[in-house]
Amino acid sequence: MTIRNPVEWGVDQFKYAAQAFESASRVGRRTRDNLHSPPPAVRRIAVADLAGVLARGLDDFATFRTDVVGFSTRFGVRAGRALCRGRSL
């Protein structure tokens, strides 16, 4: 990233403001189009739904073990430091 002068920075700020204004105006149009749309369907959550979700979450956790990666990373850094200092683990 380069250091910019105040003129470049100011031009970019005006560009970002124009983009935000344009985005906000599009949101208003979508709201008018959907003003008379039907309300969303609300479904009740049953215990069976929760059991299924928890089972899938446990499968994901078992597949992508980020806790093991985090532990091994921390252990590896500490082991490397200890070896560099000539200590035993």
Image: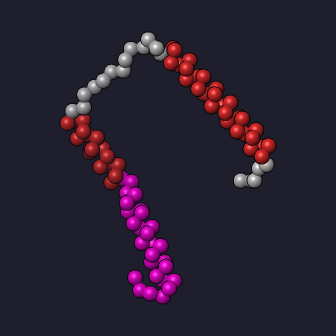
Expressed as whole percent of the image width and height from the top left, the position of residue 89 reads: 40, 82
**Which residue sits at x=43%, y=69%?**
74
Q: Is residue 18 left or right of residue 47?
A: right
Q: Is 75 within the magenta?
A: yes
Most frequent secondary structure within the magenta stretch: helix
Residue furthest toward the bottom? 86
Answer left or right for 65 relative to 30.
left
Counting the numbered discs, the total is 0
Residue 60 is one of the magenta-drawn residues: no
Indicate left or right for 50 with 37 as reference.
left
Query: From what the image shows, is residue 30 above or below residue 59?
Result: above
Judged from this view, the residue extending furthest toward the top is: 36
Q: Residue at x 24, y 35 (%)?
A: 49
Rendered position, 74 above or below 39: below
When asked about the image quadrant of residue 71, the answer is bottom left
- The residue nearer to you, when weighing 61 against 22, is 22
Q: Identify which residue is drawn at 20% across, 36% down.
A: 47
Residue 60 lies, with reference to residue 79, above or below; the image says above
Please provide the residue range marked out in magenta. 63-89
User: Which residue shows up at 71% across the image and 53% down it?
Assistant: 1
Q: Position of residue 2 (x, y in %)?
A: 75, 53
Colouring rule applied to residues:
secondary structure
The quarter of the displayed image where residue 51 is located: top left
